[in-house]
Image: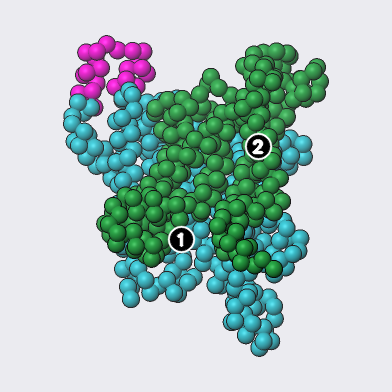
Amino acid sequence: MVAFPGVFIVRVFYAAILLLAVVVLNFSMMHLAPGDVADTIAQANGGADAEILDRIRHDYGLDQPFPVQLGRYIGNIAQGDLGYSFFYNMPVTDLILQRLPATLLLVFTAQILALVAGVVLGVISAQKPNGVASLSVTFLALFGYSAPVFWTGILLLIAFSLHIQIFPVAGMRDVTVTGGFIVQVLDILRHLVLPMVTLASVFLALYSRLTRATMLEQLRTDYVRTAYAKGLPENTVVYRHALKNALSPVVTLAGLQFSAVMSGAVLVEAVFSWPGLGTLAFQSIIARDTPTILGILFCSALVVIIGNLVTDMALRIIDPRLRKSA
Amino acid sequence: MSNPDRATVAAQSPLAESLGRFCRNSAAMIALVILSLIVLAAIFGPFLYPTDPFEMVWAPFSPPGADGFTLGTDYLGRDMLAQIIGGARVSIMIGFSAAFISAGIGVGIGALAGFYRGWVEDVLMRMTEFFQVLPTLLFSMVIVALFGASLPIITFAIGIVSWTAVARITRAEFMRIRELEFVMAARATGTPPHRIMFSVILPNALPPIIVQAALMVGSAILFEAGLSFLGLTDPNVVSWGQIIGSNRQYILDAGYTVTLPGLCIFVTVLCISLVGDGLNDALNPKLRIR
């Protein structure tokens, strides 16, 4: 039996290797792509001749061999330096730190909403496999899987911002709203509702379907029959006994979905002009701002890796069987 | 009673049996019919309705049905019907070819990992994990942004990020099948490893792979729609996502320019996933209970 902290250290070590691989991939892509930093700088300054380009390349170390450049890049990232954005005229790290909180807020609230609502729907529909809830889970699952998330967002926008005007059209804050902390928080929440629901719709479908399947399986087992036989009320059996066992595949799936949630967030942010990493990625791709794009890729991979790590640890707390294996 | 005869017939063609099961699944059959219509429209539509999707033919924002344009005109006065037909071509073509690429990569990696085990499996599975960690859409966005937005690069960018599920399924099937007796027999007769992999094991591992590949066509279409919604698409072709992306500022004036192409994506992907589910039930009847 491996001790709990031991497992954690092994996982963190794996995570670090994965992250290093992301950095190497990032750098190789930047290297392979046509054009380099010198071209970008020259462009930003209205062009330059070959001699000046060479000098810029020398100043930025671009004439060094590939491994040396790669080593320097990894060293920089280890110190939290993701390069400089010539488009925004500021360090990429600062730029990303500005936008990261908005994305994290969106991603985590959407995941939590999808998980809670998905599990509740799944449980209800497993209790009554032929009921209305079960039918709605089937339809939700089909919709969530088949509808493009940005389209769902636009439909919600048309319905709840343009026709019935209860939610704001775009952004995260209303500049005209002034007041104390609570007023500000409420304002952000009001902006958050539509993007969060849009993003959650995709994953809600997945989680509710899986919950229903695992719950149906659990409700057929002997221990559930025993629990009923000793006279426990239905809700206790369903939520205390069966759900506990049905939950771990759902949490595993949720953990695996983190990278998909980050991808979905890019589209949702673009629809609702949510000032997060996705919008930044979108803008910097249009501006051909390579350091920023690669910085965002790195940071989102980091978010996914941390998300996976947290899920992994959460699973070990939920499911004692897993504590025995590394 | 001609029981023995029946038994022989059933044993001779498991394929026909699967086909029969698929045909009895009404949801999957309806979906297949709609999907075939969409594919036919994509192939022959431009000949039957030769309006150029890029040409400005009328005043902008003419609603569907008015002025002789079945689906109206967009913000530049281009014919929406022509755009949707043109978009069908690109979306479906990219969907199928990207799914083909990722199925190829996934089967290759999964087969090697499941067949050789040991360090080969370790390395390949770490690689798979690595691709699962990268946020797929962002990674494709980076590829398209760095290497140019042409259809082959977009297709490649989608294929290269979506193979992980196929690899896992293929690996699991190979690990299961390689221990079976007929594989032992093939080994004993000295069949070279590559033939065991691709002529002996692969045909038996195909059913779940086919199902996954079918579902992947749907997700590739969604993926392409997402990229082109963000403007990462070849500017010389129309695609459904791109129509939504370019019209989305005008949802208040002309909601149909956004809802219609979205509906096309939705229906196509829905049909593909229903067909995929039908294939799953037809090819893997034992797994159906779940």
Horizontal arrangement in the rendering, residue B150 relative to residue B253 (left or right): left
Residue beneath disc 2:
B36
Write the start and end of the magenta stretch as one range.
A38-60
Between B248 and B126, the one nearer to me in the picture: B126
Q: Secondary structure at mark 2?
A: helix
Residue B275: give x, y in percent of width and height: 62, 47
| Quarter of the rendering containing residue A238 | bottom right
Residue B212: give x, y in percent of width and height: 52, 49
Q: Residue at x 33, y 34 (%)?
A: A29
Identify the residue at the far top of this view: A49
Between A281 and B17, the one nearer to me in the picture: B17
Horizontal arrangement in the rendering, residue B256 relative to residue A286 (left or right): right
In the rendered image of the structure, the colour used to display chain A is: cyan
Residue A5, placed above or below residue A272: below
In the rendered image of the structure, the colour used to display chain B is: green
Q: Which mark is residue A311?
A: 1
- The residue type indicated by label 2 comes to Ser
Q: Provide the major secondary structure of the magenta segment.
A: helix
Residue B79: give x, y in percent of width and height: 69, 19
Horizontal arrangement in the rendering, residue A266 relative to residue B197 (left or right): right
- Magenta includes A57? yes
Q: Nearer the viewer, mark 1 or mark 2?
A: 2
Q: Residue at x 36, y 32 (%)?
A: A291
Residue A45 visible in the current orientation: yes
Tell me if mark 2 has few (under 14), some (14-19) or many (20+) residues whose alpha carbon lies within 10 angstroms of its own: some
Q: Residue at x 71, y 66 (%)?
A: A129
Residue A206, placed above or below residue A151: below
